[in-house]
Image (cartoon, coloured by chain):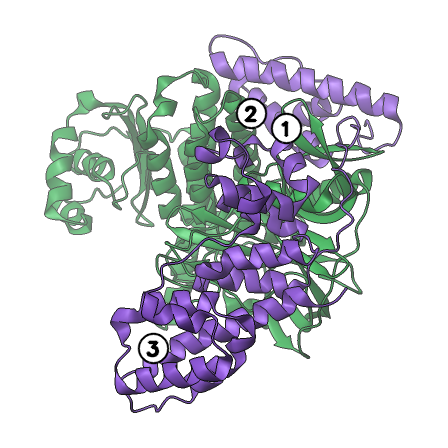
C-alpha cells in the first residue's frame, strides 16, 4: 500500500496524482451512471478492497470503489505545496492600548456610542494604537463617514490599509470613498453636540458647581426625562475633571425622587467616560 | 398453510383509510413475482414511483417489509398483498432469495436480540432525533424522554423490532444508493428535495436518525457549488460504507461496531455514558464552533487533554429562542472527568469538575504535516467524520483566489469569511500564529487564535436572533 503520509515528496506526489485521477474518473462515470458507462478500473489499494468483495453489478462495484477512494483520500490527507506567506504591514511603533481600553471600546459602542469619537481621538492623541483584533470591527463600523474613517485608519495604523488590500470588503464606501481626505483639524476635532444655551455654561464650570446644579434640578424635576438627550451631550462634553464630582452627586440623588432613574443613567455615563479617559491616559 | 381471513388483515391496518388505499392494489395485474409459502407472502408492486416496491410479509411471525417510502406500518402495499393472499389470489411457490434472506435476518435477530459487539448501545424508546455530522443525537443538555417501563419480554421484542427496522433501513439505503449509481448524478430527480426527504423519512422510521440527517445535509449540496457532483459522490460513498458496516455490526471489532452503531443513529442514553469510566485530565478548551443543522443550533467545544493529549468533543444544542452552553470559555482549562461515548468517538459528556477554570490556557501546536497526520489518524479510525480538530503553527498565504495556512511543509486551504477571516489576518499580520481549526472535507475552519496574553475565539457563531449564544 502506498504510504500517503510519507514524507517522501515524490511518493506523495505520485500517490496524490493517481488518487486524484482515479477520483475524477469516478466522478465522470457517476455523472452518467453505470447504466451508460462502466466504472473505471480500480488502482492500487482501492483495487484490493474492491476485489476482496463480491460485487455482482457495475453499480455495486462503483459504490465500493467510491467508498474506498473517499476513505483513502480523506485519511491520507496531504498538505498542498508550500506557499510564501503574505508580507506583513509596515511596522507601527506605537504601543497597543491596554486590553481594558479595548474592552471599554466594546462597552462604549454598545452602551454609550456618544463617547466613541472621544475614545478614538484620545487614543490617537496619547500615542496608542488599536489592538489588531479590533481593527476589522472598527473598519467595518466606519466605512461611510469620511472623518471617522480617517480617524479610524490613523488609530489602526498601517495594518488598516494592509488589511483593506487583502479584504476589499473592508474598504471605505459612500462619502468616505468619494470626498477628499479630511484635514488634520477636522480629524482632531470632536463633533459638536447640541446643548441648549442654559446648559452650555455648565460645560466649562467646575465639577462641584455642575454637580450641585444637576442634582438639584433632577431631584426637583426641573430636568426630567425629556431632557435626557441634551444631558447626555452635556456629560459627554463637560470638562473631564468634573466627571468624578458629577458622578458622585448624581449617584447621591434621592432614590424616591422623580429624577432618580435619569440621574443613575447619567452617573453611569460620567463614570464610563472617566474610566475610558483614565485607561487611555496611562503613561507608557 | 392457513391463510389469514380478510378480517384478520383488516385488524392490522393502522386506519380505515389505509385499508381503503390498499383496495385498488388488490388486483393481480398490479403485482409481479407474487408468491407465498407456509411462512411468508411476497410480491413486487408497481406503485406511483419509478421503481417497483418489494413487499414481503411474515404471516407467522407477523412482520412486514416494504421498500415504499410510506411512514405507515403496515403500508398499503403490505395490506394489499395480504388481502390478495387471503382471497386466494397468491399461488404457493418457493420463496426467492431476498425473502429467504429477510426471514433469516429476522431469525438471527430473534436469537441474538442485540448485536454482540455493541454492549452499552441499548436502544431507547426515544424518537430518533436530529443527529449531527459527528453522528450524534440531540440529547445533551435536554432531559431524556423517560420510556414507560415495559415487561422484560416486551422490552426485548421492542428492541428486536428496532434492530430489524434499522437493518431493513440500511438495506433500503444501500439499494437507493445503488440506484443513484445506475442512473447517475445528472438524474433530474436529484434536484428535487422530495427525492432526499423521502429517503430521510424512511431512515428516521428505521431508527437511523443520524443517517437521515446526513441525507438531508446532502440534499443541500446538490447544485450548491460548481464541484457539487464530486462532493455528493463522496458523501454517497460514505453512506454506502456506513450502510454496509451497519449491517455487519456483529462481525466488526467491538469499538468499531460501537462507532458504526452510533454513527448510524443508535441511541445511547446519557446515563449509560456517564456510568462509564471517566477520562480525567486537565482539559484545554481549544475551540468552539456553532452550526445550524435543520432547526437546531449545534455548538461544538473542542477540548484537548493536557496529559493525555487526546481530543474530545462536547456538544450542546438549542432550538429557537433556547440557549447554547456558555459555561466553557475558549482559552481556558478545567480539571474534570469526561465520559466518552462508545467506540473511538471524540464525543464525550462533561462529568465532575475538580477545580476552577484555569486561564489562560492553550493547546500544543504542531506543523502542517504533523497536523495532517493527526487528522488522518482520526479519520482512519472513523472515516465518516466530517470535522476533526487540530492546532497548528502557521502563517497565512494566498493560493490562487483563496487563503491558506502554510509553513515549510505545505498548506491547508482555509474556509473563512467576514469577521473570522479579517481577525485572523489582522492578528497574524504575516507572522506565524498558533491556530486551532476544524478540518472539513472542503477546507479548514479557523476557530481560535492563541496569543501570548490569551486566546481569540473567531469560530462561526450562532445567529443571536435565533438562539442565545453569547
Answer few, some or many: residues within 10 Å of disc 2's Cα (few below 14, many 20 plus, some between 14 and 19): many
State the hue of chain B: green
Q: Callout 1: residue from which chain?
A: B
x and y percentages locating residue B182 in the rendered image: 46, 17
Nearer to us of marks 1 and 3 is: 3
The alpha-carbon separation of the residues under discs 1 and 3 comes to: 52 Å
Q: Callout 2: residue from which chain?
A: A
Q: Earlier in the sequence, mark 2 or mark 3?
A: 2
User: Element under label 1?
Assistant: strand
Answer few, some or many: residues within 10 Å of disc 3's Cα (few below 14, many 20 plus, some between 14 and 19): many
State the hue of chain A: purple
Both labels 2 and 3 in a single chain: yes
| Residue A63: numbered disc | 2
Would you identify the image quadrant in which residue B307 lies? Answer: bottom right
Would you identify the image quadrant in which residue B45 lies? Answer: top left
Q: Nearer the viewer, residue A93 or B361?
A: A93
Query: What residue would you read off at disc 1?
Result: B402
Q: Nearer the viewer, residue B451 or A127?
A: A127
The alpha-carbon separation of the residues under discs 2 and 3 comes to: 71 Å
Amino acid at each position: 500500500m502506498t504510504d500517503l503520509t510519507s514524507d517522501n515528496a515524490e511518493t506523495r506526489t505520485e500517490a496524490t496524482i493517481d488518487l486524484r485521477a482515479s477520483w475524477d474518473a469516478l466522478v465522470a462515470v457517476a455523472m452518467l451512471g453505470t447504466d451508460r458507462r462502466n466504472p473505471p478500473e480500480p488502482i492500487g489499494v482501492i483495487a484490493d478492497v474492491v476485489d476482496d468483495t463480491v460485487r455482482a453489478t457495475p453499480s455495486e462495484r462503483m459504490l465500493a470503489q467510491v467508498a474506498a477512494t473517499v476513505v483513502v483520500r480523506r485519511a491520507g490527507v496531504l498538505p498542498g505545496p508550500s506557499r510564501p506567506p503574505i508580507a506583513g504591514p509596515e511596522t507601527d511603533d506605537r504601543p497597543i492600548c491596554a486590553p481594558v481600553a479595548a474592552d471599554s471600546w466594546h462597552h462604549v459602542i454598545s452602551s454609550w456610542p456618544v463617547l466613541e469619537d472621544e475614545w478614538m481621538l484620545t487614543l490617537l492623541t496619547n500615542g496608542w494604537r488599536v489592538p489588531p483584533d479590533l481593527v476589522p470591527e472598527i473598519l467595518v463600523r466606519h466605512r461611510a463617514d469620511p472623518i471617522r474613517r480617517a480617524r479610524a485608519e490613523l488609530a489602526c495604523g498601517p495594518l488598516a490599509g494592509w488589511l483593506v488590500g487583502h479584504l476589499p470588503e473592508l474598504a471605505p464606501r459612500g462619502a468616505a470613498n468619494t470626498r477628499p481626505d479630511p484635514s488634520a483639524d477636522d480629524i482632531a476635532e470632536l463633533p459638536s453636540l447640541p446643548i441648549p444655551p442654559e446648559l452650555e455654561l455648565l460645560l466649562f464650570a467646575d465639577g462641584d458647581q455642575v454637580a450641585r446644579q444637576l442634582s438639584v434640578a433632577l431631584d426637583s424635576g426641573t430636568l426630567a426625562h425629556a431632557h435626557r438627550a441634551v444631558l447626555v451631550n452635556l456629560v459627554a462634553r463637560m470638562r473631564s475633571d468634573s466627571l468624578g464630582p458629577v458622578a458622585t452627586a448624581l449617584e447621591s440623588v434621592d432614590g424616591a425622587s422623580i429624577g432618580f432613574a435619569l440621574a443613575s443613567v447619567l452617573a453611569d455615563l460620567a463614570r464610563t467616560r472617566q474610566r475610558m479617559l483614565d485607561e487611555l491616559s496611562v503613561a507608557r | 398453510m392457513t391463510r389469514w381471513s380478510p378480517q384478520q388483515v383488516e385488524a392490522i391496518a393502522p386506519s380505515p383509510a389505509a385499508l381503503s388505499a390498499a383496495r385498488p392494489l388488490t388486483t393481480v395485474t398490479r403485482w409481479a413475482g407474487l408468491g407465498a409459502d407456509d411462512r411468508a407472502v411476497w410480491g413486487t408492486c408497481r406503485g406511483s414511483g419509478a421503481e417497483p416496491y418489494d413487499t414481503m410479509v411474515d404471516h407467522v411471525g407477523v412482520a412486514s417489509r416494504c421498500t415504499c417510502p410510506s411512514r405507515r406500518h403496515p403500508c398499503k402495499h403490505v395490506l394489499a398483498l395480504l388481502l390478495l393472499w387471503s382471497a386466494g389470489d397468491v399461488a404457493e411457490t418457493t420463496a426467492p432469495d431476498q425473502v429467504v434472506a429477510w426471514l433469516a435476518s429476522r431469525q438471527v435477530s430473534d436469537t441474538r436480540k442485540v448485536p454482540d459487539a455493541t454492549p452499552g448501545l441499548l436502544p431507547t424508546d426515544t424518537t430518533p432525533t436530529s443527529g449531527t455530522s459527528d453522528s450524534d443525537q440531540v440529547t445533551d443538555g435536554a432531559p431524556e424522554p423517560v420510556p414507560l417501563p415495559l415487561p422484560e419480554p416486551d422490552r426485548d421484542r421492542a428492541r428486536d423490532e428496532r434492530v430489524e427496522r434499522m437493518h431493513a433501513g440500511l438495506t433500503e439505503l444501500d439499494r437507493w444508493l445503488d440506484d443513484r449509481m445506475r442512473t447517475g448524478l445528472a438524474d433530474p430527480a436529484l434536484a428535487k428535495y422530495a427525492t432526499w426527504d423521502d429517503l430521510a423519512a424512511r431512515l428516521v422510521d428505521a431508527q437511523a436518525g443520524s443517517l437521515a440527517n446526513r441525507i438531508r445535509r446532502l440534499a443541500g449540496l446538490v447544485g450548491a457549488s460548481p464541484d457539487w457532483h464530486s462532493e455528493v459522490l463522496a458523501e454517497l460513498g460514505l453512506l454506502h460504507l456506513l450502510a454496509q458496516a451497519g449491517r455487519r455490526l456483529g462481525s466488526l471489532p467491538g469499538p468499531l461496531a460501537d462507532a458504526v452503531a452510533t454513527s448510524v443513529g443508535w441511541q445511547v442514553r446519557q446515563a449509560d455514558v456517564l456510568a462509564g469510566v471517566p477520562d480525567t485530565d486537565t482539559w484545554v478548551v481549544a475551540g468552539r464552533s456553532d452550526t445550524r443543522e435543520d432547526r437546531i443550533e449545534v455548538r461544538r467545544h473542542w477540548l484537548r487533554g493536557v496529559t493525555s493529549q487526546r481530543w474530545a468533543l462536547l456538544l450542546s444544542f438549542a432550538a429557537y429562542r433556547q440557549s447554547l452552553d456558555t459555561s466553557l470559555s475558549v482559552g481556558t482549562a478545567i480539571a474534570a472527568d469526561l465520559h466518552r461515548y462508545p467506540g473511538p468517538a471524540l464525543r464525550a459528556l462533561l462529568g465532575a469538575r475538580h477545580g476552577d477554570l484555569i486561564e489562560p490556557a492553550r493547546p500544543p501546536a504542531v506543523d502542517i504535516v504533523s497536523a495532517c497526520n493527526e487528522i488522518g489518524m482520526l479519520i482512519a479510525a472513523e472515516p465518516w467524520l466530517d470535522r476533526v480538530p487540530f492546532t497548528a503553527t502557521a502563517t497565512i498565504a494566498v493560493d490562487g483566489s483563496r487563503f491558506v495556512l502554510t509553513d515549510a511543509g505545505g498548506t491547508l486551504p482555509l474556509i473563512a469569511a467576514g469577521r473570522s477571516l479579517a481577525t485572523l489576518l489582522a492578528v497574524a499580520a504575516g507572522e506565524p500564529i498558533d491556530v486551532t481549526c476544524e478540518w472539513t472535507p472542503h477546507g479548514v475552519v479557523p476557530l481560535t487564535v492563541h496569543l501570548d496574553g490569551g486566546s481569540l475565539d473567531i469560530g462561526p457563531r450562532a445567529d443571536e436572533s435565533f438562539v442565545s449564544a453569547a
